């Protein structure tokens, strides 16, 4: 059994970790922390889990964690994990961090888009946790920087084509749409039901920090910095994310060749589904699951390749992929605890 | 008083026409037709209007319409109006058609994307009813082809820049999102609440018939056929539409110059609002109104110009613009009956 | 022209007041106050009103208000108006207070359910602003205590039957359902989109402070304290309220007699619609309007009378009724500025 | 392994059966039927299950079913199962019927509220499948009439108190609220997204056929016909149901005694959760699960007992309870395949 601590168990990503881990056959949760709710039960804060997950919430205590946990999931806002991870690693824990703190191998790049990094020496060691692409590195890692939700959704359809060097990286447009849970459980007017429920808007237009994350990973694969234009939008739905990416190919390829490329890339990866021709993803089709559904169309009139991909932002876009990485780190079946079926509706 | 007939008064666009016209100070509705509900009252079919709009619904009767109406709004599926419009015009009525039948000045183009045209001789005469751009022609028109919702939303931010010849028309991406009412009032699994309410998807990817409509109008202005890649998406909201368009400029322009260009273009047009820097449209901000809200951002990293625009698909995207065109045709104040305020929430 | 001040113009009820008043032909808004947003424009806080309601928001200034306003609408949380109203009245303003502070003619009753009253001497003077029932008193009032949303929705179908002494007041069940805007614009986890959007729950079960308000008004009419069991519920919708009340009659009456009683009671009241047999209210049918729609059914099997009523909680349940009361106070047509049509959908 | 056939696998209840059964460790689905979609795969009709449940859909074939299935779930509209069940039983299958056809032990009662019964001889044999109350009978049954969703939600909190003879059955009010999936997957204007999404209404006021079902079961327990006033409402949510019941007790009981009674009744029943004092159900807390959450409050002012209960209408209200009954019939752990966790949000 892997002894697991979840730090920040009462945000949406943290709670989703707890929920999925509670059914994982090889995991025992030994500590859940919450600054705000310490002393209460998990099910007091999340009443759906009454009589199901009645674990106590505690204050963060590094000694206790080091003594009781093999693996620590950090589900905290960025800037906090960088202060905690070094002592957890020293204590012998392995760490999967869901914040942005350890996603950039170059701390200078992190500091360009975020703030000063307080553990820059670990950035080089940390492995980017896009499970389908860095499995081998993840397998041996002490520290995994779990990808952002938008990068996960956008990179999965894109990277196999980048690897083939088919993509004209000078002009890639990524128009992405996320459900409201992506904004987290914190309260603000921006997540007030009445402000959201029948609306739809673009936000952080051309200024979202997931853009450099996407660019950085592509650059690592392509050895060329791509020009990504990225606009996220807010969908009035609780969970889910869909991205529509538009790009030109450097050489002529048929739609069938592109589909074949993606199918080959993912033929042994259980969580990526390349949809049959004519079928397109709906974020409700992946709700609650660790799937990334991908469809494509090569526009016959303009030659533009359209990639459509969908994930659940809290699962494949956060907690599910973190658990997938845990499975990889412990050499378990990648799908263990994660073979969740979506709802009928 | 303009005597008005609404043909197809019980679809969403038709009913919205009736609702807005019922408060128009210069209009008297003399006939509402509905094949399905003839013999009932409008308020029987739309119970919110009980004691407010208790007008009878009748079968289509060309003689009666010609005798009683100066203007006929056609709110029918395409292919039907082309059979009815010739005799209405002969009878002396003017016509605003909300279907696609009279949006293409070249019937061959219509037939490429739709079906055989049965009144091709009228296509050349018909005026495309994008009120802000073809006001003079609309003013004197017998027959107006009212624009599609997507073309309205996408063309309004784009056309002033095209007129300036600033836009590289070889690669324009339009990623558009519509509320469910765009699918009409007909019943189908695709509009079942349970299939929609927490979903989001792309549809008719690269294959929607509003693309050639957009391209055709741009071509008319630019004297060059643009390459538009167009993907519509379905938002789980009742009304509203938002488009995010991505394009490159042929020469260097600052964001301020582009904003200035749009502000100049619309400085006397009451229904287009160019938002101040840093503010972006939300489809809930234009709900129920005839506004088109527009924002822009020149991505400093990629040089791509991002245009975001929002309308209410049933108002500026259909019935409101049709009434705006009527006001223009009768030399009334353009905003008469249309100065509707959006809801607070 | 009535010179009007709106105190608390940036809550949902205050903003709705501003929105409706901006189209009222006999009103000039001379002051909008907001502690939180003073110095900004109304349209900065509510961007839908850009270029439509660009009035400044100011700090509360009693001297300025007294000098510039004939009527003051108070749209503040309870406990605040009681400190401000005395000096406004002394200064010669008339006041419509949307809080609970002046709804109880007996300050002791107020203090039982709320807190200490600081202007108890005004409670006796204040008129309960249920427009349809206290029109004459409202007409001459200096101070109107505008009803709560639940009391408005529940009392309108009930009071005419109570006046006839038909109702067994020993056991009345009121099961009410409100949209989320009833919780106000303040931020809290309870109004977070993700916590609400696909949920439904009862709240303040048997403990909501609108119960004594309902009971107090019925007691005033019936000279008997009724036993009201009242459970409010939260509907995942932005606006609207529906109440289903269950009661027994003291003597046998047919459904037709009861309908006739309600129709007679409201035959000259433009905002109450008694629906025809077999048709029931939907809160979407009154959205944005000042209507109260009422239906009834006498259960043939149990003899229980079922009353179903619906209002828009922000209009007839708050700001619309406040304006209706203003119209009554100034002897204007009751519907002036309020003859708003609901949306088609 | 239990060999299972699902008849009507493409309605919402049928699909939910397939989804849950696909993870049941003791079940093998041998046949899924669908008149409309025969020849396609289950995952063609329900694309979320692509690569997960790619089973074929077939036409109904009684011989094949009898040969290949031990248990048949009927998920069809009422009136159809009564024609099919006799030959299935003769062929040796056991049957759980989700329609109303076999819920009434007296066919005359069925015919009063539904239509002519074509297998009246089986009504007496059929066991009402409210798992918590009729476990022993279900255990040995050949034929189970699976309860309606409203009866399940209303009876579970009520029956233990009825058994104690505490309830005044002369006047019970049940105000119930259901998500849209209760209306089924058939298309109609009534389930069109735009007609539902921001609405809320009562329907079949005092006329819903679940009332006699509730009354019939209570009568069986109490040996007295109760007077139930029942009004269902439609909540704009996909799944879930909440009922608020109001009743008077025949003798004085404290809230604590009532809670104790319910806790005792369900202390060994894994799917009924009596919530702690002060906590009330939310239908989002039971979404996707087989739970029935129950809370209660004895109104101190009126003495009325308020019972609030929530279920997922498709799980505990249909397919989940059907599978729970299967587990009981095969002497399996009652929770097998059903220990589903609700979502965090």
Image (cartoon, coloured by chain):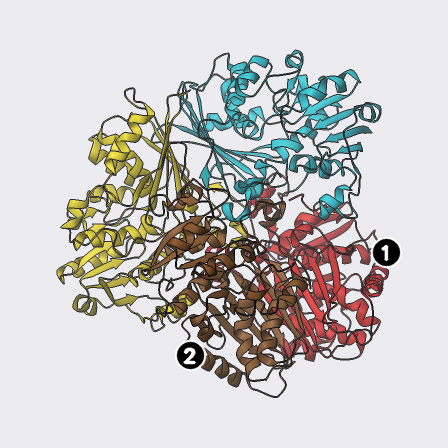
Chain colours: A yellow, B cyan, C red, D brown
C13 on left or right of B337: left
Q: Helix, strand or loop at disc 2?
A: loop
Observer-nearest of A245 and B208: B208
CA–CA distance in space, label 1 to label 2: 58 Å
Residue beneath disc 2: D267
Q: Residue at x 52, y 55 (%)?
A: D84
How many residues crowd mark 1 within 10 Å: few (<14), some (14–19), many (20+)?
Answer: few
B90 on left or right of A327: right
Residue B128 locus on image (x, y percent): 62, 20
**Residue C78 visible (yes or no):** no
Observer-nearest of D17 and A12: D17
Q: Quadrant of residue D176?
A: bottom right
How many residues crowd mark 2 within 10 Å: few (<14), some (14–19), many (20+)?
Answer: some
Q: Quadrant of residue A206?
A: top left
Q: Residue at x 76, y 23 (%)?
A: B330
- For disc 2, the chain is D
D222 on left or right of C329: left
Residue D227 locus on image (x, y percent): 67, 74
For the image, the number of numbered tags is: 2
Q: Helix, strand or loop at disc 1?
A: loop
Q: Is residue A229 above or below residue A147?
A: above
Residue that extends furthest to the bottom in the rendered view of this protein:
D252
Residue D247 locus on image (x, y percent): 63, 77
Residue beneath disc 1: C268
B5 on left or right of A206: right
Q: Is residue A202 above or below residue D289?
A: above
**Residue B212 visible (yes or no):** yes
- For disc 1, the chain is C
Select label 1 or label 2 by which is in front.
Answer: 2
């Amino acid at each position: 059994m892997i002894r697991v601590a979840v730090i920040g168990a009462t945000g949406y990503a943290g709670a989703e970790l707890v929920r999925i881990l509670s059914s994982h056959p090889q995991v025992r949760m030994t500590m859940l922390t919450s600054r705000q709710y310490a002393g209460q039960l998990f099910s007091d804060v999340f009443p759906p889990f009454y009589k199901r997950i009645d674990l106590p919430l505690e204050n963060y205590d590094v000694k206790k964690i080091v003594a009781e946990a093999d693996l620590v999931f950090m589900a905290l806002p960025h800037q906090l994990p960088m202060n905690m991870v070094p002592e957890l690693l020293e204590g012998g824990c392995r760490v999967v961090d869901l914040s942005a703190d350890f996603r950039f191998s170059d701390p200078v790049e992190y500091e360009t888009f975020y703030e000063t990094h307080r553990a820059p020496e670990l950035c080089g060691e940390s492995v980017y946790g896009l499970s389908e692409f860095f499995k081998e590195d993840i397998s041996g890692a002490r520290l995994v920087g779990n990808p952002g939700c938008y990068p996960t959704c956008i990179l999965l359809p894109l990277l196999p084509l980048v690897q083939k060097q088919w993509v004209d990286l000078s002009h890639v447009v990524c128009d992405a749409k996320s459900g409201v849970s992506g904004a987290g459980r914190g309260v603000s007017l921006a997540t007030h039901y009445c402000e959201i429920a029948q609306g739809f808007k673009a936000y952080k237009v051309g200024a979202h920090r997931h853009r450099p994350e996407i660019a950085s990973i592509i650059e690592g694969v392509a050895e060329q910095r791509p020009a990504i234009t990225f606009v996220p939008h807010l969908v009035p739905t609780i969970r889910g994310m869909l991205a529509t990416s538009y790009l030109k190919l450097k050489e002529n390829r048929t739609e069938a060749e592109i589909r074949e490329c993606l199918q080959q890339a993912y033929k042994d990866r259980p969580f990526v589904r390349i949809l049959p021709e004519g079928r397109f993803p709906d974020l409700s089709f992946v709700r609650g699951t660790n799937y990334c559904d991908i469809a494509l169309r090569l526009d016959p009139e303009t030659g533009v390749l359209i990639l459509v991909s969908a994930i659940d932002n809290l699962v494949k876009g956060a907690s599910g992929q973190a658990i997938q990485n845990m499975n990889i780190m412990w050499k378990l079946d990648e799908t263990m605890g994660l073979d969740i079926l979506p709802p009928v509706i």
